[in-house]
Image (cartoon, rainbow, N blue to C red):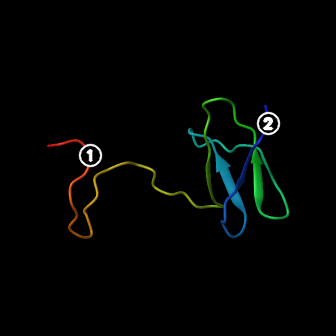
Amino acid sequence: MPPCVVRHGIDGPVEIRDRHGRQLDHETTADGTVRIRLGKGESSLITARGDRPDLSMRPVTPNAPAPRWGLPA
């Protein structure tokens, strides 16, 4: 399988994890591009080393009034 190639724009070292939080092997090139081997249907999360963002989904409070969108109420 060919590698997935990503230029991420994160300053400094990165960690790449699968959907279960396990670290994935990857290769970083001199220009900051990473190569990750992913199988069909797999995904990865690229973060700054040591960063553990909250990935839970929940409703958010809007920061300004806006028209509704999506399916009709």
Sequence-wise, the earlier of marks 1 and 2 is 2
Image location of residue 8, percent across then percent down: 67, 60
Q: Are marks 1 and 2 in contact (CB under 8 Å)?
A: no
Residue type marked 2 = Pro
Query: Which residue occupies 68% across, 45% down?
Result: 23
Element marked by disc 1: loop
In the rendering, which numbered label is found on residue 2?
2
Q: Is residue 49 above or below residue 18?
A: below
Mark 1 or 2, closer to the camera: 1
The N terminus appears in which quarter of the rendering?
A: top right
Report the front residue among 17 and 44: 44
- Check disc 1: other Cα within 10 Å, few if <14, some if 14-19, many if 20+: few
Query: Which residue occupies 25% across, 62% down?
Result: 61
Report the front residue among 49 and 39: 39
Element marked by disc 2: loop
Query: Which residue occupies 28% across, 52% down?
Result: 59
In the rendering, which numbered label is found on residue 70?
1
Image location of residue 64, percent across then percent down: 24, 70
Residue type marked 1 = Gly
The C terminus appears in which quarter of the rendering?
A: top left
Q: Is residue 19 left or right of residue 1?
A: left
Q: Is residue 25 above or below residue 61?
A: above
